[in-house]
Amino acid sequence: MSARGADPGRAPAITQATGVEWGRWAEILDGAGGADLPHKELAQAAHAAMPAAVDNAGWWAQSVAVAYEQWIGRRIPGQAHDGTFQVSATRTMPGTMREVFDRWCELTGDLTELDGLTVTDGPRTSGTDKRLHWGVTLADGSRGNVDVSPKSADKTLVAASQVNLTNPDDVERWRAFWKGRIKEL
């Protein structure tokens, strides 16, 4: 876990996006009683202090809250607020959102396992005009998700994730797995 006082790994990105140095964010959240606040209230405090000019302020407030939790030793990188772990891999590919999603569904058509774990629920699919989703639940309780969204008329972002992991040692295994599966597209 990060030692209090050491800048969290996302500090440079947070500073660049918000225009606020990491040390100042730490002061703001400490002043709000951050060490005793749950994640939601940390994010609310960060959002309240977010400069008005910041694009996507809610997302950056969440990033500040997560970085603060790492900084005080409450969570480690890859750990969700509920104590589980998650990992993702992304890639931009040629094709429309529908074309890429259809290729994914064809590739995973009769899927019964992922990386040796039995699929206990799914695959499930859903979607909107902005995003298409594919998901499965595995025997260990973790979930595999693939979300496909347009980047332009002929390019699509594929974001694969494994969530609800109970062991931090599984993070890199799943990162490699999802990178490999995305490459198969």
Image (cartoon, helix red, strand yellow):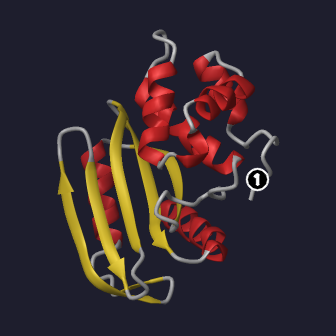
Give the residue number, with chain letter if any, for mark 1: 2
**Which quarter of the picture shows residue 143?**
bottom left
Where's the C terminus, which quadrant?
A: bottom left
* Residue nearest the viewer, comparing 112 with 141: 141
Residue 39 visible in this rendered orientation of the protein? yes
Neighbour tally class for label 1: few under 14, some 14-19, many 20 plus, Cα within 10 Å? some
x and y, in percent, of residue 4 in the image: 78, 46
**Which quarter of the picture shows residue 17?**
top right
In the picture provided, is 67 more to the left or to the right than 153?
A: right
x and y, in percent, of residue 8 in the image: 73, 42
Residue 185 visible in this rendered orientation of the protein? no
* Residue nearest the viewer, comparing 53 with 117: 53
**What is the three-letter code of the residue carrying label 1?**
Ser
Which residue lies at the image location 49% right of the left edge and 89% below the top edge?
116
x and y, in percent, of residue 72 in the image: 69, 48
Which residue lies at the image location 43% right of the left edge and 24% below the top edge?
56
Q: Please tell me how many numbered marks the rendered image carries.
A: 1
In the depicted structure, whether residue 117 falls above or below residue 149: below
In the depicted structure, whether residue 111 falls above or below residue 179: below
In the picture provided, is 10 more to the left or to the right than 156?
A: right
* Residue nearest the viewer, comparing 147 with 54: 54
**Which quarter of the picture shows residue 130?**
top left
Q: Residue furthest top?
A: 53
